[in-house]
Image: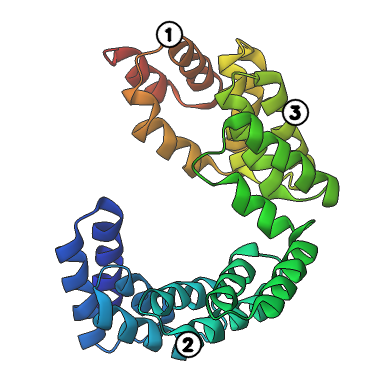
Amino acid sequence: DYAEAYFRRGMTYKTNGTRDKAITDFKRAIFFNLNTFELYYNLSYLLHKERRWLTLDQALLLNPDSYEALTTRGFQRYEVKDFGGAVSDFEKAIQVNPGRSTPYEMVSDIKKELNDIKASMAIKKKGAEMCENSIDELFYLSKVETCNENDKIEFYDRILALDPKNKKGYRWRAYAKNSLKDYEGAIADYSSLINLDPQNAVYYFKRANVKIKADDFKGALDDFKEVAKLDPEFLDLYFERRFMDLNKEHYLEILKSLMLSLRSEEHTSELQSRQY
């Protein structure tokens, strides 16, 4: 399908920062009759002013309940002082996701600019009440640029206190702990993820990587064996694309042990013949 192919390549260009090529491919996808929210929403980020608004309008026709598109258009309307349109978009965003603070703050600011102080204070108070224990808001706050790893862990602690089975909370807290070299803490979080989803090979794999850093080679090998049982294609792909690019003694030792345990003599011979 030409349209899907152009869209996928456009997304690759967008991710790589190749703006003009991404726009060209997205427009080609539209020419071949691709009419999806994802296409118009991603294209809107690459365009300027009026063209961006028109593209966002089309995206919202396809998905009128997109929080991201509503808040994006709300900010754009605010910038050109279309306060009525901005308030409309932010209020709809609140209906879609009442646990995020940004739309409350924007409506409050606009009401204040319009000298409606009473309404401004009322919406600000409502936002504070709705977002105080909002998991979505806590995730959002953990991703702001000024948030360091320790701050993030505090947010994830609060999230997991509200929802002890929140897999994203454990996953992101494990990343933060790993960044701080709290390997035991990261391993514990990946263990919690495995308890919640024991058939997910990725969690064993992530835990194995942290165990390598903690010098627990036997534990890492055991986890790699689980990955091989659950999803051997994933394991092979990762070896080929990442591990073979690393010149680290610890990884090399794990690879040799793993290949000897799980793969054929041909794989083992190939590994041992590689230059590190």
Nearer to us in this view, 230 or 169: 169
Residue 121: horizontal and vertical position, in percent? Answer: 71, 71
Q: CA distance from mark 1 to mark 2?
A: 59 Å
Q: Residue at x 31, y 75 (%)?
A: 4
Q: Residue at x 70, y 74 (%)?
A: 123
Mark 1 and mark 3 residues within 8 Å of each other at the beta carbon: no
Q: Residue at x 80, y 64 (%)?
A: 129
Mark 2 crowdedness (10 Å alpha carbons): few <14, some 14-19, many ≥20: some
Question: As drawn, which residue projects farthest toward the front?
Answer: 115
According to the picture, the residue beneath numbered tag 2 turns out to be: 85
Q: Does residue 225 show up?
A: no
Q: Does residue 95 show up?
A: yes
SS of the residue at dot 3? helix
- Upstream in the sequence, badge 1 or badge 3? 3
Mark 3 crowdedness (10 Å alpha carbons): few <14, some 14-19, many ≥20: some
SS of the residue at dot 2? helix
- Amino acid on which the number 3 mark rests in the picture: Ala
Mark 1 crowdedness (10 Å alpha carbons): few <14, some 14-19, many ≥20: few
According to the picture, the residue beneath numbered tag 3 turns out to be: 188
Task: Tell whether 42 sits left or right of 233.
Answer: left
- Amino acid on which the number 2 mark rests in the picture: Gly
Residue 19: horizontal and vertical position, in percent? Answer: 20, 61
Residue 29: horizontal and vertical position, in percent? Answer: 24, 80
* Above/below status of 246 relative to 33: above
* Above/below status of 69 relative to 169: below
SS of the residue at dot 1? helix
According to the picture, the residue beneath numbered tag 1 turns out to be: 249
- Upstream in the sequence, badge 1 or badge 2? 2
Q: CA distance from mark 1 to mark 3?
A: 25 Å
